[in-house]
């Protein structure tokens, strides 16, 4: 179960990071929607990529995975606050909520 959660959390970090690095139009729209300059918004992708690497390293050295998941939780809480400030409904915040649930479950199991 731990390996499955690790891979799921890695995917939850890599998918949005890839969109940010690729400059996907949806990511650019989201950055504009939140009023975050694109260059700064792409830095979130760096944090997501670091979290994915940490979770994978956590398969061999658990403390790295725990730190990565905790960092991801902080990032996702910030995302939820940003969604709230933008007056988004739950549907727009759902990816962040699901990733938060995965990261929380990872911490609980680890």
Image (cartoon, grey):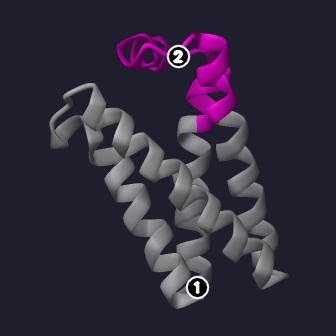
Q: Which residues are magenta?
A: 17-44
Q: Quadrant of residue 20?
A: top right
Q: Residue at image x 52%, y 64%? A: 8
Q: Residue at image x 59%, y 12%? A: 38
> How far from the left and from the top, in percent, is residue 56?
75, 67
Q: Is residue 6 left or right of residue 102?
A: right
Q: Mark 1 falls on what kind of element?
A: helix
Q: What's the distance in space between the residues labelled 2 and 1, CA to CA? A: 31 Å
> How far from the left and from the top, in percent, is residue 100?
42, 60
CA neighbours of label 1 inside 10 A, class few (<14), some (14 to 19), many (20+): few
Camera-nearest residue between 58 and 80: 80
**Circle 2 is placed at which residue position?**
24
Q: Is residue 53 magenta?
A: no
User: In this picture, is 88 found above or below 30?
Assistant: below
Q: Which mark is residue 2?
A: 1
| Discs 2, 1 touching: Cβ within 8 Å | no
Q: How many marks?
A: 2
């Amino acid at each position: 179960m731990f390996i499955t959660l690790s891979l799921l959390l890695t995917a939850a970090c890599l998918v949005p990071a890839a969109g940010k690095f690729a400059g996907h139009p949806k990511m650019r729209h989201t950055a504009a929607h939140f009023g975050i300059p694109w260059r700064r918004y792409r830095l979130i992708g760096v944090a997501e990529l670091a979290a994915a690497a940490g979770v994978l390293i956590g398969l061999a050295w658990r403390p790295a995975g725990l730190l990565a998941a905790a960092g991801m939780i902080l990032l996702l809480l910030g995302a939820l606050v940003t969604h709230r400030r933008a007056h988004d409904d739950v549907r727009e915040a759902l990816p962040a909520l699901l990733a938060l649930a995965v990261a929380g479950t990872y911490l609980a199991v680890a």
